[in-house]
Image: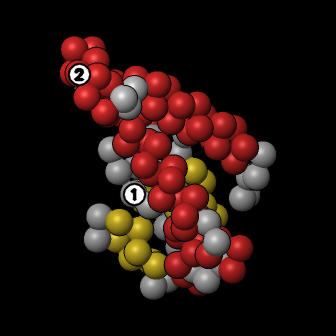
Amino acid sequence: MVFLGFGKYVRADRIFALEPILGEERGGGKRTLVWVEGIAEPLIASRTERTILQDMGQDASAQLSVLEDALALAERLAEDSEQIGPLLARSIKAESGVDIGDLGKRARELLEQTARDGDDQHLF
């Protein structure tokens, strides 16, 4: 059984395709469309295709857990940097030397790059 998030589980041998959700549709627990044998519409998973593949036993994806954690952190940084006010961002930079705006910008660039790289690898 593979955990998809939100209390959803499916048999690994019934999954026949994974499709990453990209763009504005991604977020709020929507990461991957999971196509399951016997179900007409794909299920929406809150986990990425890499973590689902890892749970399915894909050897190549086992090494990607660190990358997956880094991408999740980048996504949180990008979201948080947009919500932080300019005054608070300046205060953080003055106190710690950390430029939250710059980190958010770099995180968004990283996420955009990984989304473009993944577009070449269609699973179906």
SS type, badge 1: loop
Which residue in the protein does label 1 denote?
A: 46
Relative to 40, is 63 above or below?
below
Amino acid type of the residue tagged 1 in the rendering? Ser
The x and y percentages for residue 42 are 50, 58
Q: Nearer the viewer, mark 1 or mark 2?
A: 2
Q: Is residue 47 left or right of residue 22?
A: left
Query: Looking at the image, which residue is at 36% across and 29% down?
Result: 97
The x and y percentages for residue 71 are 51, 50
Q: Quadrant of residue 65?
A: bottom right
Q: In this rendering, does residue 100 appear at all? A: no
Q: Earlier in the sequence, mark 1 or mark 2?
A: 1
Given residues 25 and 104, the one toward you in this image is 104
Query: Looking at the image, which residue is at 69% across and 80% down?
Result: 59
Which residue in the protein does label 2 denote?
A: 91
Given residues 96 and 100, the one toward you in this image is 96
SS type, badge 2: helix
Query: Looking at the image, which residue is at 59% across and 71% down?
Result: 53
Query: Looking at the image, which residue is at 58% across and 31% down?
Result: 109
Amino acid type of the residue tagged 2 in the rendering? Ser
